[in-house]
Every structure is written in structure tokens, then in C-alpha cells.
């Protein structure tokens, strides 16, 4: 009998498990709207031209495979912080940011969670209800307590702003508040600039520490600066904050696992100490991060031609998603005779649409229509083509009514 006999079967991951089920389906109209990964109009994975160009440069230079420092590639860390805050931001000029390269967004969030667990024992992280499914896993595994604040209002398919504010107010002073920098996952609903100001007011009043998850910079609106405006608004108030970044979506580097954790501190002296502790936490976890994706980012951002081309490709990707969003809305409105108002689809931003379909309705989408999606009603528009918008609209209308 096995020594591992007491280990039970773990449930499939609610997001990545969807792709496994999709692969096993042989129906010709099948559609994978589960995982948030960009697809071309032919529904094929896409490698950005700037990535290919940067890789060619790297190959020509014959770069070696030596270990990176624990905190990652210096040129990447500089580029990623400047991309986030803007190169002339006071936090950069005053060297108040502790930046460490992380294993994409997830690994960077995990490293920050380890920092919270070690230096803020008992402090709670407030997360939005709902949120990206992995947030809870990350804080659970790091042994950081969390609770939820209201975010989504099913009645309006919009933001429950009053609920959000009162839950942030009700939390113990000095809690961490996890915020999605842009393109909230799964709802696609972001606060307005005015609402961001009020959120910052309450967080300051309560001496909370904002903790941004920025997984879609440039990918939501097509503009790197516009998508970082929430983070910059908080930084401009002189607040201390944490920001996890990911290059999975905006540079299509999903499998390269490239991202960063940034901790904005009140002085360069504190930032230096925080960085030393991030390194101390990373060393026994994974020793040092992978180099390939870091070099790609550093080369793209550091070369003005490639940087401009990246912005164009990002706009192209964001634009394609906006197009299918519009076409899906048009198809839903034209086909649905019930009079339901579908305009929420247009108001949402980023790669997802939160359809409002419940668990049973989402299962109908998959079982009857071969549309694979998470059971919370979220669909990834990045996995949708114009050609399949009408089919998807039929499936949604049938599942709703
Ligand atoms: N945070 C959010 C909100 C996400 O949607 C994702 C990816 O789907 C991530 C973080 C992390 O992704 P990765 O670890 O691939 O960078």
C-alpha cells in the first residue's frame, strides 16, 4: 500500500480545468472562453512581433544563461517601475520604490503575501467580491487572513460603490486593500476616476495599505499610461503601496513567467530595507527568477522603435477585443426578443465580460452549446472571433431564458 494513500484527489482548477475539458470536446462549434489568453481572429495563440524581434536581438548578442541576482535583471526592474509610474514620477526620482522581478503576476503577488505574513502578522487583506479565483489561494497558502469587500452589484451589473466604501471603512485600521489597477477580473467593471479618489480618501483615513494587482496595463484601454492612472493617483498622494505587475497579457509572455513586485515606501532608506527582505524571502522559495522574459521586456522597453511597435500591437489586441465586444452586444440586442438591456456588455472593460449567467446557466452554455467558460458567468472575449459572435449570442440568450 502506498505511503501516499491518504492523499485525496484535488479538484480541477476552476479556470485552467476549463481548457482541459475544452480539449476533450470534438464539436465543431466549440469555443474556449475560459482562460484569459489573447487569440487572433482565427482563434490561434499570438506571439507579438516585438517579442520575436527582441528575441532575435538577444540571440545575435549571444547572451549567456548565468544566474540572475535574487532580485532579477536590473534593466528589467528599472524598465518595469518606469512603465508603471512614468520615468519622471517622484517615487522613482526619490528612489522610494523597492522592485523585485517575480514569477509573473502570480509569483509577485505570492512574494508580497510572504512579506505581509512576515512583517504584518495578523493583518488582513481585503479582496473584492468577486475577484480573480487565484487571489484566495495565494493568501491562503501564504497564511495571510483575508476577507471580502462588496464590489459587484448583480442588480445593475455594475459597481457596488457604496458597499465597497463601507466595507473598506469597516475593516480594522491598517489592513491591506487589494485593488485591480484596471480591467477588474472577472467583472470588467472599474471605478471612475472620481470614485478612485474617494477610495484613496477612505484608505488614507483608515491607514490601510493599498495593494494593486496590475495584470492588464496597456491591454485594457490600449494605453499604458491610462491603465496605470489608478496606481499613479495613489502614488501622487505620497502613500506607501504595493503593486504586482504581469507581462502575460500585454506582451503575450504567459509562459515566460515575467512580472514584478514594487513596494513604494516613504523614503529610499526604507525601500532599500524592504528590497533586502524581498530578496531574503525569494531565495529559499525559488532562488532567483528566469532571465528570458526579463530580457525581452528590457529590450522592448529600452529600444524606442520596439517600444513604439509594442504600443501599436497592444492597441491592435485591445481593439480586436473591443470589436468583438461591440459585435456581441449588437447580436444580443438584435436576437433577444425579451427586451433585456444588454448595454452592460459595452460598459465593461478589458478581456472579460461578466455575463450575469449563474452556475446552472453557465453549465448549459457548456453542455448544450459547447461554450467553455468559468461557472461564475465570466467569458473571455479574447477567445472570441467576430465570426462566432452570433453563435455565442444564441447560446447566451438560450441559457438566460
Ligand atoms: N491577477 C489577475 C487579476 C489576473 O487576471 C491574472 C491572470 O489571469 C494574474 C494576476 C496573473 O497572471 P500571471 O501569473 O500569468 O501573470
Image (cartoon, rainbow, N blue to C red):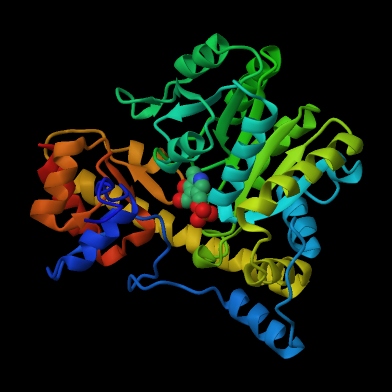
Could you tell me which quadrant the N terminus lies in?
A: bottom left
Q: Nearer the viewer, residue 167 or 390?
A: 167
34 over 232 or under it: above or below? below
Who's the residue at 27% across and 41% down the image?
Answer: 377
Could you tell me which quadrant the C terminus lies in?
A: top left
How many numbered marks are there? 0
Q: Residue 329 location, x and y as percent?
A: 29, 47
Q: Residue 277 location, x and y as percent?
A: 76, 42
Task: Tell whether 310 sits left or right of 379.
Answer: right
Q: Residue 367 location, x and y as percent?
A: 10, 52
Q: Nearer the viewer, residue 120 or 313?
A: 120
Q: Nearer the viewer, residue 283 or 181?
A: 283
Task: Tell whether 244 sits left or right of 372.
Answer: right
**Residue 336 visible in image:** no
Who's the residue at 40% across and 55% down the image?
Answer: 36
206 over 196 or under it: above or below? above
Which residue lies most toward the front here? 1
**Residue 358 visible in image:** yes
Task: Tell whether 280 sits left or right of 226.
Answer: right
Q: Nearer the viewer, residue 355 or 378?
A: 378
Q: Residue 95 location, x and y as percent?
A: 88, 44
Who's the residue at 84% across and 39% down the image?
Answer: 273
Task: Tell whether 343 sits left or right of 235.
Answer: left
Who's the residue at 74% across and 47% down the image?
Answer: 280
Q: Quadrant of residue 391?
A: bottom left
Q: Quadrant of residue 381?
A: bottom left
Amino acid at each position: 500500500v502506498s505511503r501516499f494513500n491518504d492523499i485525496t484527489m484535488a479538484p480541477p482548477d476552476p479556470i485552467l480545468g476549463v481548457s482541459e475539458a475544452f480539449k476533450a470536446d470534438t464539436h465543431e462549434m466549440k469555443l474556449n472562453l475560459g482562460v484569459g489568453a489573447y487569440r487572433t481572429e482565427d482563434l490561434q495563440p499570438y506571439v507579438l512581433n516585438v517579442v520575436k524581434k527582441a528575441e532575435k536581438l538577444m540571440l545575435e548578442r549571444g547572451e549567456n544563461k548565468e544566474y540572475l541576482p535574487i532580485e532579477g535583471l536590473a534593466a528589467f526592474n528599472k524598465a518595469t517601475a518606469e512603465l508603471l509610474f512614468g520615468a519622471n514620477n517622484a517615487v522613482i526620482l526619490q528612489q522610494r520604490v523597492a522592485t523585485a522581478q517575480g514569477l509573473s503576476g502570480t509569483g509577485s503577488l505570492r512574494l508580497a503575501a510572504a512579506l505581509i505574513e512576515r512583517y504584518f502578522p495578523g493583518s488582513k487583506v481585503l479582496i473584492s467580491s468577486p475577484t480573480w479565483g487565484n487571489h484566495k489561494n495565494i493568501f491562503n497558502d501564504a497564511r495571510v487572513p483575508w476577507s471580502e469587500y462588496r464590489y459587484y452589484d448583480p442588480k445593475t451589473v455594475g459597481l457596488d460603490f457604496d458597499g465597497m466604501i463601507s466595507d473598506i471603512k469597516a475593516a480594522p485600521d491598517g489592513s491591506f486593500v487589494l485593488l485591480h489597477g484596471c480591467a477588474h477580473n472577472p467583472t470588467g467593471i472599474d471605478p471612475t476616476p472620481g470614485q478612485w479618489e474617494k477610495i484613496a480618501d477612505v484608505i488614507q483615513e483608515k491607514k490601510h495599505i493599498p495593494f494593486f494587482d496590475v495584470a492588464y496595463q496597456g491591454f485594457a484601454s490600449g494605453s499604458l499610461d491610462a491603465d496605470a492612472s489608478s496606481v499613479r493617483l495613489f502614488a501622487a498622494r505620497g502613500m506607501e503601496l504595493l503593486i504586482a505587475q504581469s507581462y502575460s497579457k500585454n506582451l503575450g509572455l504567459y509562459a515566460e513567467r515575467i512580472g514584478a513586485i514594487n513596494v513604494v515606501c516613504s523614503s529610499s532608506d526604507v525601500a532599500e530595507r524592504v528590497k533586502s527582505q524581498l530578496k531574503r524571502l525569494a531565495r529559499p522559495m525559488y532562488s532567483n527568477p528566469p532571465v528570458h522574459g526579463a530580457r525581452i521586456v528590457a529590450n522592448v522597453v529600452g529600444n524606442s522603435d520596439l517600444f513604439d511597435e509594442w504600443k501599436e500591437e497592444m492597441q491592435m489586441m485591445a481593439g480586436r477585443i473591443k470589436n468583438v465586444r461591440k459585435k456581441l452586444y449588437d447580436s444580443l440586442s438584435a436576437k433577444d426578443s425579451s427586451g433585456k438591456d444588454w448595454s452592460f456588455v459595452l460598459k465593461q472593460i478589458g478581456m472579460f465580460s461578466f455575463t450575469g449567467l449563474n452556475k446552472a446557466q453557465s453549465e448549459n452554455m457548456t453542455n448544450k452549446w459547447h461554450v467553455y467558460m468559468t461557472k461564475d458567468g465570466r467569458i473571455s472575449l479574447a477567445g472570441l472571433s467576430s465570426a462566432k459572435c452570433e453563435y455565442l449570442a444564441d447560446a447566451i440568450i438560450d441559457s438566460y431564458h
